[in-house]
Amino acid sequence: MSILTYPDVFQYQDEVIVGIDPGTEYVGITFLYINPSNRIVTRIEPITLQASLLRQLHQPYTDCNNEEWGRTDRINNLVSSIDRLLKCKNVLAVGMEAAFMNLKRPDAFRALVEFTTVFKQVVHYQVNYFSPLEVKSSIGVKYTQLKDGMANAIKTNPDIIRLTYGGIELASEHAIDATAIALCLFRYHYPGGTL
């Protein structure tokens, strides 16, 4: 009879910090896998969900062609998919961008509020909300810098490049934003933690 041994990677279950960039068509999600014994990030996994593609996987909540019902249906499909993903992980914390008024894109406020409202009703995790200022400052970007500044800071960080599953350069702008939110939440939970 032989005794099975497992590599060290199976001796613990990584804790997962989740960053979410909300939206009604595209949602960025990033999973930061953390070794709980030494508080080191072991892997970064950014993904983007697209509501119009998810519609094929989920039964629509209504057959009505009303635009508002269609929007609600998209958000419900996105949130249900996120809920399924989170149930497969050892989730420590969830972070999300707080609803804020962007004067360049005023319609985005509505999408943020709608998504976060449905998320609270469906997904039963405590959510940490961060302002754009908190997210940018956590990765060393000045608030006055445009969105490209944050994407550049994420895509050129050697630790993030090394840890990202699938390559950070391929990540969408939504997944990049979710990565910044996840890193902000990681620094909030583990002030001394490292990548």
Image (cartoon, rainbow, N blue to C red):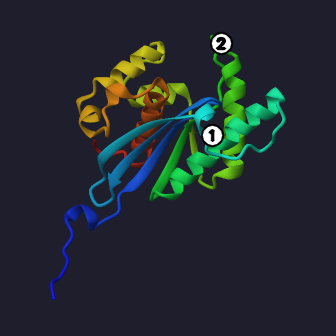
**Cβ atoms under marks 1 and 2 closer than 8 Å:** no
- Identify whether 31 is placed above or below 88: above
For image coordinates 47% across by 34% down, the residue present is: 178
Position of residue 124 measured from the top left corner of the image (x, y, whole percent): 63, 55
Secondary element at tag 2 = loop
Report the side of 146 relative to 65 (left or right): left
Residue 56 disc label:
1
Tell me how far mark 1 sits from mark 2, CA to CA.
34 Å
Residue shown at 31%/38% (left/top)?
A: 164
Residue assigned mark 2: 103
Drawn side of residue 50 relative to residue 59, left or right: left
Q: Is residue 22 visible?
A: no
First in sequence: mark 1 or mark 2? 1
Bin the neighbour count of mark 2 within 10 Å (Cα to Cα): few under 14, some 14-19, many 20 and up. Answer: few
Which residue is more in the foreground, 10 or 136? Answer: 10
Q: Position of residue 139 (x, y in %)?
A: 38, 29
Q: Residue furthest left?
A: 2
Point out the frontmost of discs 1 and 2: 1
Residue 186 x, y percent position in the rendering: 41, 44
Three-letter amino acid code at the position of disc 1:
Gln
Which residue is more in the foreground, 113 or 26?
26
Decide: is 2 above or below 33. below
Determine whether, in the image, residue 72 is placed left or right of residue 194. right
Question: Where's the N terminus, which quadrant?
Answer: bottom left
Residue at image coords 50%, 28%? 174
**Amino acid of disc 2:** Leu
Q: Position of residue 134 (x, y in %)?
A: 49, 30
Q: Is residue 166 visible?
A: yes
Residue 62 horizontal side relative to residue 170, left or right = right
